[in-house]
Amino acid sequence: MPAISYRGGELPESAIRKLVPYAEKAKSLGRKVYHLNIGQPDIKTPQHAIERIRNFNFDLIPYGHSFGNDTYRKKLAQYYRDRNLEVDESEILITTGGSEAISFAFMVCFNPGDEVIIPEPFYANYHSFAVANNVVIKPITSTIETGFQLPSIAEFEKVITPKTKGIFICNPNNPTGYVYSREELMQLQELVLKYDLFLLADEVYSEFVYDGKSHHSVLELGRINENVVMVDSVSKRFSACGIRIGSLVSKNKLVLKTISKLAMARLCPPMLGQVVAEAAVDSPPEYMEGVYQEYLQRRDYFINALNGIEGVYSPMPMGAFYSMVRLPIDDSDRFCQWMLEEFEYEGATVMMAPASGFYFSEGAGKNEVRVAYVLNRDDLKASIICLKEALKVYPGRR
């Protein structure tokens, strides 16, 4: 039997999805599973975007432009300009989800063996994209005690080597909900200039920033236009994860020209997904305000309720709809599996994502989980009760 590639062997399991078989088994036994493990919103996709599909009147569904449909790119460029980001449609490439945008950026910005610095904890799939593209992650650790604020520039410089070619941030952050300030981005700009690095930014959650704070995009950093690649997606903004439409934005013409070769090789992003996304961009302000307020109310209830459980701590997320939560347990992987395999309360249990999958450093996050407050408030309340009862009887409680 031939051996698989070393890259295949090094790919990590998804911290978000690896426990799905246990959840399915729990459901087969009649238990209700509250899914806090994944950022799958239960808020409805804009109705007019759904109607656009129902009224889709092509006689066939053709290939589209490799860069994405011109009409959608123009509309998306205007969306960014409305948010004071000077973006032209020629600087946008539409991708099959934000995931493809990240993979494209890794492949084009970095050579095999190059290093990219990522503050941890970070979105678990970044690790997979790095392995698939032979890119080496150099983590610097942010901590729950500081609310996961950006580590100091001195910490970045400690891990910079001749192989360092980039920095990658997520803002607002998944999994922590931290929002980087303009001052923090300015510090990163100076570091990028000093070492001539790429600065990649995942800004998928830019619409969800709370408590009077503002989102500052890397596209605002005018001194490093040639160094910046921004990744975006409509999955969470318009509650349309399944259409798989993302985007990559850069003012670096060589980066875009090179990525266009990958775009042509995969032919085009999903045509029907772009139809939905283009319609969704026209959503009235009332839709986005309603979604924003719903997440804000969910956050306020859920995080305060978590902190009301003895031994549990979560910083108040500034953005997105995730939080890293410290629990009084021995091992989050063991605890999350135990919740699905062995525990139920009034016929229900809770599925969470072990935090170990969001850290690159060995042994980090052993007593933390990532939760997504994407459920309606009744389900969030039920999940809090269930978690509280589970912690009372978990054999590995500390």
Image (spheres, rainbow, N blue to C red):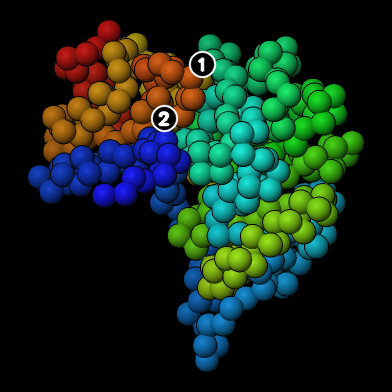
> What number is the disc on residue 389?
none
Residue placed furthest toward the right: 223
> Can you give x and y, in whole percent of width and height, for residue 212 in the image?
68, 31
Of 138 and 7, nearer the camera is 7
Q: Disc 2 residue type?
A: Gly
Point 63% across, 47% down: residue: 107
Please report contact status of discs 2 and 1: CB closer than 8 Å, yes or no: no
Q: Residue furthest front?
A: 1
The reply to whether residue 172 is in sight is no
Q: Which residue is mark 1?
A: 144
- Left or right of residue 230, residue 20 in this image: left
Amino acid marked by disc 1:
Ile
Tell me residue 296's x, y (percent): 53, 37
Q: Position of residue 278 (x, y in %)?
A: 63, 68
**Of 212 and 141, the residue lying toward us:** 141
Tell me: 346 left or right of 299.
Answer: left
Residue 130 rendering spot, x and y as whole percentages? 55, 38
Q: In the rendered view, does 142 fall on the left or right side of 360?
A: right
> Which circle marks residue 357 in the picture?
2
Compared with 374, 117 (above or below) is above
| Looking at the image, residue 397 lies above or below residue 99 | above
Residue 77, by quadrant, is: bottom right
* Residue depicted at x 59% and y 36%: 135
Quadrant of the image occupied by residue 292? top right
